[in-house]
């Protein structure tokens, strides 16, 4: 059974880098982005998620590495 895409399900068109609570859902405890296979996100949103996480890290909103 395939997982539903979180962003399609909640009708989110654009992933905002400032929304760290949503971004944290897709990071593992070490701060790495989870794969599409684990989360069930569509490819379009996975690319947007990667860019949003990178921007949030650069702006200091998310850690690069969690200890």
Image (cartoon, rainbow, N blue to C red):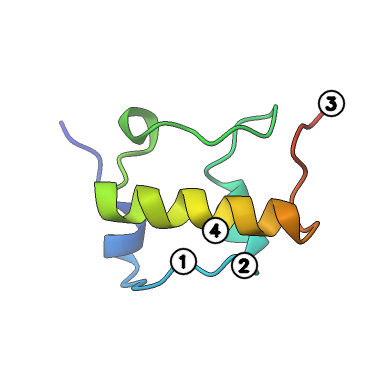
Residue denoted by label 1 = 15
- Residue in the image at 68% along x and 34% along y: 31
Verify CB contact (< 8 Å) between mark 4 and mark 1. Answer: yes
Question: Does residue 65 lie above or below 15 as drawn?
Answer: above
Quote the CA–CA distance across marks 3 and 4.
21 Å
Q: Position of residue 36 (x, y in %)?
A: 34, 35
Left or right, 4 with respect to 14, comes to: left
In the image, which is nearer the foreground, mark 2 or mark 4?
A: 4
Residue denoted by label 3 = 67
Label at residue 19:
2
Quote the CA–CA distance across marks 3 and 1.
26 Å
- Residue in the image at 77% along x and 58% along y: 61
Q: Secondary structure at mark 3?
A: loop
Question: Does residue 54 lie above or below 64 as drawn?
Answer: below
Using the rendered image of the protein, determine whether residue 51 is visible from the camera's viewpoint. yes
Quote the CA–CA distance across marks 3 and 2.
22 Å
Sequence-earlier tag: 3 or 2 = 2
Label at residue 52:
4
Quote the CA–CA distance across marks 2 and 1.
8 Å
């Amino acid at each position: 059974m395939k997982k539903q895409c979180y962003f399609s399900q909640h009708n989110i068109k654009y992933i905002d880098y400032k929304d760290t609570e949503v971004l944290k859902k897709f990071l593992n405890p070490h701060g790495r982005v989870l794969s599409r296979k684990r989360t069930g996100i569509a490819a379009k949103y996975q690319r947007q998620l990667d860019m949003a996480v990178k921007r949030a890290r650069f702006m200091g909103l998310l850690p690069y590495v969690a200890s």
